[in-house]
């Protein structure tokens, strides 16, 4: 083991490339997209040292061009889950005993590989596999995962440096941050490549071993991430990547005595079912598992009558419709004072009508496809019901088409009642619901915002009035884990606004912060006494 108290490189946020016409990065990204589209790849599972393939092949297609085949992945079974657990546990001893700076070096190298060699390949995979435009892919699949890796290494070193501040005479107290006893299950979502990469890596960084199951629609980019981790020097078995059904994974993992925790991003319903299943099996486990999850939201923008109308409009159209609204922080409900609604509606109509919609290969398209047919069908049913409802009106958009890709035009619903379904239920698509309130009822409206939805992920206040900002900040304290003032309610940056929410939005363990990493260690205190007592008798026992 090397000797020294090592300082890791100071983390800085990765610069975001613009991909403007004529830029070098634009040309390189287009080349990577063309190359990816020109071939059909065979995506294996990664279990221990093996690339595992099966006879059951499943198509990988772009959501915006669902007849084009990018490749196939191998569908696994319960046995593959068991094999992945076995591989993880076999790797555990060597990995957790590897000095922390050696683990750090692996993930810092992965960050540099993404920043340089693999930037365009990973972005292209996200653009094609998850239908994101170049700027969205740049922020997500390149910059955010780079930031996660760099900042998490820094947080890891700070956690290890935290030690008891006091020692009695002749005593040395210290703390060891142990990896969890067993393996961790990383269950990752379809929408963000960076989140999918962070969920297993932050766990592994702290000395744990992982079984990773991505959403089926994220497998295409997950494969690239795994190639990068391997090239960065991640040992076999530390992170095992499997493609199995949720029930098959759960039936094996949640009954295994060495299950030590789950790192999850997905729907509230699934997370609650997982929590219930863990509770039912709690007697099976060697340790009480860590349950960490971020589960979605019904994110809000509240406008005060003093709001700058242009700021408000930009926050709404960007916040609601970038990423096709398929972002857990996307603005999906807004509360607008009566005095601003008329002018705001006109500005929104103008901007939304200017949106170009289509595939990600055309860089002039601002809006792309939703992730798959299931999502398309769910979202459009809400739109159809709003068209028919006496309590709502579709005032902008409402069109959709899935003949070539799963395209839903950005849609604005005007709710006539404060409890209309699209003000409270998560849609996860390009649909924004507006509720117009009387200007004088601002404080009353804040209470409505706080009580309408089960979620508490993100929210924002748009106002030029500082008293209104202060009031909203206090009244909405528990309504959002990430709160924004005069900005859209999206756009958390690692190291700046660590991300998470409470209530139905999850355990608020703040991805991109030290808080999250602390969930993946188990502290042990060690007390060493240099001159221990040799007689049980305390001085007070002596005779006068």
Image: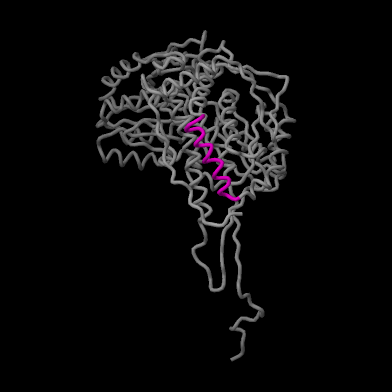
Q: Residue at x 43, y 28 (%)?
A: 330
Question: Does residue 162 sit above or below 149 in this rendering?
Answer: below
The structure residue drawn at horizontal position 70% and vertical position 40%, both measured from the top left corner, is 281
Residue 335 figure quarter? top left
Q: Quadrant of the C terminus?
A: bottom right
Instruction: State left or right for residue 430 relative to residue 103.
Output: left
Q: Position of residue 311 (x, y in %)?
A: 29, 28
Residue 58 drawn above or below residue 100: above
Q: Is residue 468 magenta?
A: no
Looking at the image, residue 51 lies above or below residue 507: above
Across and down, in percent, residue 208 comes to 62, 44
Q: How many marks?
A: 0
**Residue 479 visible in this rendered orientation of the protein:** no
**Towards the viewer: 150 or 316:** 150
| Between 132 and 191, the one nearer to me in the picture | 132
Quarter residue 353 falls in: top left
Left or right placement of residue 211 versus residue 436 in this view: right
Q: Which residues are magenta?
A: 99-117
Image coordinates of residue 355 in percent, x first then y, are: 37, 15
Q: Residue 110: within the magenta?
A: yes
Outermost residue toward the bottom? 544
Q: Residue at x 40, y 18 (%)?
A: 366
């Amino acid at each position: 083991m090397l000797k020294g108290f090592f300082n890791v490189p100071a983390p800085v946020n990765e610069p975001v490339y613009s991909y403007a016409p004529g830029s070098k990065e634009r040309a390189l990204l287009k080349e990577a997209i063309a190359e990816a589209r020109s071939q059909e790849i065979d995506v294996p599972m990664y279990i221990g040292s093996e690339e595992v393939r099966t006879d059951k092949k499943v198509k990988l297609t772009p959501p915006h061009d669902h007849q084009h085949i990018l490749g196939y992945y191998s569908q696994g079974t319960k046995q593959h889950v068991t094999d992945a657990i076995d591989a993880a546990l076999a790797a555990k001893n060597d990995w957790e005993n590897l000095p922390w700076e050696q683990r750090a070096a692996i993930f810092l190298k992965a960050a540099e590989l993404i920043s340089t060699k693999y930037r365009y390949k990973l972005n292209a995979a996200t653009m094609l596999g998850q239908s994101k435009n170049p700027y969205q892919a740049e922020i997500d699949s390149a910059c955010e995962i780079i930031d996660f890796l760099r900042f998490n290494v820094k947080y890891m070193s700070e956690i290890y440096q935290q030690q008891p501040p006091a020692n009695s005479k002749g005593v040395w107290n210290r703390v060891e941050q142990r990896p969890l006893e067993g393996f961790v299950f990383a269950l990752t979502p379809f929408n963000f490549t960076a989140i999918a990469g962070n969920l297993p890596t932050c766990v592994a960084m702290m000395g744990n071993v992982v079984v990773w199951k991505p959403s089926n629609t994220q497998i295409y980019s997950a494969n690239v991430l795994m190639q990068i981790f391997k090239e960065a020097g991640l040992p076999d078995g530390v992170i095992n990547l499997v493609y199995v059904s949720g029930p098959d994974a759960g039936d094996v993992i949640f009954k295994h005595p060495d299950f030590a925790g789950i790192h999850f991003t997905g729907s509230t319903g699934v997370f609650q079912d997982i929590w219930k299943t863990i509770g039912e099996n709690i007697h099976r486990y060697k340790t009480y598992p860590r349950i960490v999850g971020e589960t979605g939201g019904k994110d809000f923008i509240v406008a005060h009558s003093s709001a700058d109308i242009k700021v408000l409009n930009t926050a709404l159209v960007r916040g609601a419709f970038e990423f096709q609204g398929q972002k857990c922080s996307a603005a999906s409900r807004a509360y607008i004072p009566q005095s601003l609604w008329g002018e705001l509606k006109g500005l929104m109509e103008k901007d939304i009508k200017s949106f170009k919609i289509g595939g990600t290969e055309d860089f002039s398209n601002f809006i792309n496809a939703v992730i798959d047919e299931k999502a398309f069908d769910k979202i459009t049913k809400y739109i159809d019901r709003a068209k028919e409802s006496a309590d709502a009106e579709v005032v902008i958009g409402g069109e959709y088409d899935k003949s070539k890709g799963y395209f839903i035009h950005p849609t604005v619903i005007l709710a006539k009642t404060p409890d209309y379904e699209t003000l409270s239920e998560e849609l996860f698509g390009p649909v924004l619901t507006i509720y117009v309130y009387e200007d004088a009822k601002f404080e009353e409206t804040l209470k409505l915002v706080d009580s309408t939805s089960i979620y508490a992920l993100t929210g924002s206040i748009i106002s030029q009035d500082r008293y209104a900002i202060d009031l909203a900040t206090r009244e909405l304290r528990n309504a959002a884990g990430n709160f924004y003032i005069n900005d859209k309610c999206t756009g958390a940056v690692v190291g700046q606004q660590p991300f998470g929410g409470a209530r139905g939005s999850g355990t608020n363990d703040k991805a991109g912060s030290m808080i999250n990493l602390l969930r993946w260690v188990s502290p042990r205190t060690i007390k060493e006494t240099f001159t221990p007592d040799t007689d049980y008798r305390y001085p007070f026992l002596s005779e006068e």
